[in-house]
Image (spheres, rainbow, N blue to C red):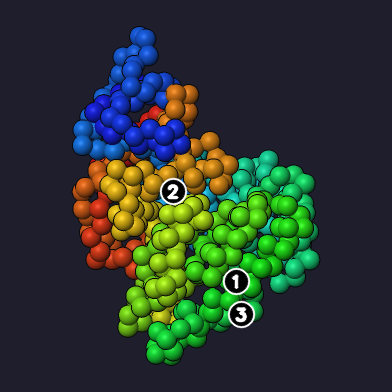
Amino acid sequence: MKLHIKNGRLIDPANNIDAQQDVFIAAGKVVGIGKAPADFTANKTIDAAGLVVAPGLVDLSARLREPGYEYKATLESEMQAAMQGGVTSLLCPPDTDPVLDEPGLVEMLKHRAKSLNQAHVYPLGALTAGLKGKALTEMAELTEAGCVGFSQADEPILDTTVLLSALQYAKTFDYTVWLRPQDPHLGRNGIAHSGPAASRLGLSGVPVMSETVALYTIFELVRSTRARVHLCRMSSAAGLELVRAAKREGLPITCDVGAHHIHLSDMDIGFFDSNARVNPPFRSQRDRDAIRAALLDGTIDAICSDHTPVDDDEKLLPFGEASPGATGLELLLSLSLKWAEEAGVSEADGLGKAIAKVTADAARVAGLPAGSLKVGDVADVCIFDPKTRWTVEAKALASQGKHTPFLGYELSGQVKTTIVAGHVAFER
């Protein structure tokens, strides 16, 4: 299939392009920017007048719920959600059932995803067997099977010597370890941010120091091993200050934030809205403002959807009993654009900054061949209208998980076309 995308505003932060330029695609690759190669005849022409043409989005955390949790979501439903959200590459955490700690399971997931011919799926392998925090997995074999890094998902490692061994091993083979900074004991049974809102609602709290104490430990281990660590789902101002200092020191660390944490705080729990039950919990407005500032100054490298579909049986419960999680694949673009709009960045710069956080910057963090549209690159493209406003409604979401704290919100930015490896995978 030869495609010609014409009249669009091409925004490709990886290559510093923001201009009206046509894009030419053949054999799954970008073969021309601005000018068609010799003897190029398009099978299909897409008129992108008034639209933005960007690299396909790269999502650093999307739970696809397979294998084991098909009652919450299936690969088919979540891949369709990815296409509607313009997400062409996604990383999935290893907390499936069974856990992604065996090469055969990783290969099966990759094969299932490939057969659907939609988004590229990059699994994170389990750092320890069964995510139990005791014995390290066979990281070399998991890497051969297709894992791009190693994670404990939301399961903490109680024994710091195990984490030290994991980082030493990862450094030897140049693997990235993905860790969510949370102390295993502080706020273990907490369900909301420790603060006035939780006290008023009578909810057990998760203190900010559960994040900062974990960060101090991780940074000490990184200083010793020089292993590359990616910090998942930063949530607090104090934690981000520690990350800022660690980056100044030259430690090999990166970090991301969940898209919903950029906009919401613990006040959005309202009267026990279980859709606002997420992990880590929404923190104070001061923390939320610090997240926005850290995205602007580059302390936070990327925005992810933290897509965690939850079914009605586990969500329509009292706040403390509801399962944490929110659907996010289809909201990632709009919530990123909303951040740029509210951050006070000019419209000319804002679109580029927002797109960078979910394309080039995210791809760099994960070490993926994605997030770029230069000649020769795989043709993963997201074409969207930044001006179109849409209302977040359960029936509008392709994901099997219909629960998000943004239900009823009106957001800007609607994906019109998603192209994966040169084939049109979605058209609105």
Residue to which mark 1 is pinned: 212
Q: Which of the 4 quarters of the picture holds residue 117?
A: top left
Q: Work out whether residue 107 or residue 207 is closer to the camera in this orientation and state it.
A: 207
Q: Which numbered disc, 3 or 2, marks the residue that appears first in the sequence?
A: 3
Q: What is the count of numbered marks? A: 3
Q: Amino acid type of disc 2?
A: Lys
**Outermost residue toward the top?**
39
Q: Report the residue at 31% width, 56% height from top.
A: 344
User: Reading the chain from its start, which is encountered first: label 3 or label 1?
Assistant: 3
Q: Residues within 10 Å of mark 2 (few under 14, many from 20)?
A: many
Nearer the camera: disc 3 or disc 1 = 1
In this view, the residue in front, 134 or 290, is: 290
Q: Which amino acid does label 3 sit on?
A: Leu
Quadrant that contains the N terminus? top left
Look at the numbered disc 1 and give the secondary structure of its residue. helix
Q: Is residue 363 above or below residue 60?
A: above
The answer to whether the residue labelled 2 contacts the one labelled 1, judged by CB atoms less than 8 Å apart, is no
Indicate the quadrant containing the C terminus: top left, top right, bottom left or bottom right.
top left
Which residue is under mark 2? 357
| Residue labelled with disc 3 | 186
| Secondary structure found at label 3 | loop
